[in-house]
Image: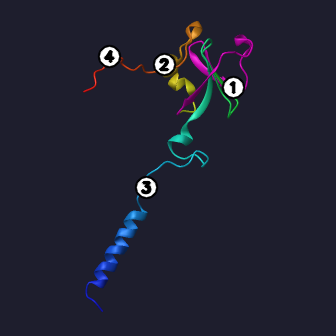
Amino acid sequence: MNRCQPRTMLTLVMLTGTLLSMPAWCAPPPWAPAHGHRAKERKYIYYPAREIYFEPARRLWFWLDGGSWQFGARLPISIGSKPSGGVSVLLATDRPYEAHDYVVTYYGKGNKAHKPKKEKKDKHSKHD
């Protein structure tokens, strides 16, 4: 028996253990169950004209009432009919009002609602 064989085996065992404990290098496919960051994202419908959110998964409405956010399975009578002109928004929170400043900046509010902003390329940049 060769004297180097036990050291080689020990090295291979340690290397294999190290490789197996490393995290995956790629993201899971879209059809896989969500874990981590993707699991925390929730889809909302934001209605900019009235600053109202609807979360289809939980069938919950979120609205501002007298300076504080309220939520429920139905909109209050004071709001009136179901709003229209909603846009789909993905947020990493179960309380959309926590990201309201971001949503208003990106999608607008009131009658000044607008499409999401897109970055413009600089037409005057020089290429070396």
Say which label, 3 or 2, has the lower sequence index. 3
Q: Quadrant of residue 75?
A: top right
Question: Closer to the N terminus: mark 2 or mark 1?
Answer: 1
Which range of residues does the magenta coloring cover?
A: 63-92
- Disc 4 from disc 1: Cα separation: 51 Å
Residue bearing mark 2:
117
Which of the two discs, 3 and 2, sits closer to the camera?
A: 2
Q: Coloured how? A: rainbow
Q: Nearer the viewer, residue 66 or 39?
A: 39
- Point out residue 70 in the picture as x, y percentages from the top left corner: 63, 21
Amino acid, disc 4: His
Q: Position of residue 40 (x, y in %)?
A: 54, 39
For label 2, the SS is loop
Q: Amino acid at mark 3?
A: Pro
Q: Say what secondary structure mark 3 lies in.
A: loop
Residue at image point 53% right, 14% down = 108
Q: Which of pointers 4 and 2 indicates the residue nearer the eye?
A: 4
**Res 57 quadrant in image:** top right
Q: Which residue is mark 4?
A: 124
**Callout 1 amino acid:** Gly
Residue 23 is tagged as: 3
Viewer-nearest of labels 4 and 1? 4
C-alpha gap between disc 3 and disc 2: 35 Å
Q: Indicate yes or no whether the magenta region holds residue 73.
A: yes
Distance, label 1 to label 3, CA atoms, is 40 Å
Q: Residue at x 59, y 34 (%)?
A: 42
Q: Which mark is residue 72?
A: 1
- Whether label 4 touches label 2, CB < 8 Å: no
Packing grade of label 4 (10 A; few <14, some 14-19, many >=20) is: few
Q: Quadrant of the N terminus?
A: bottom left
Q: Are marks 4 and 3 in contact (CB under 8 Å)?
A: no
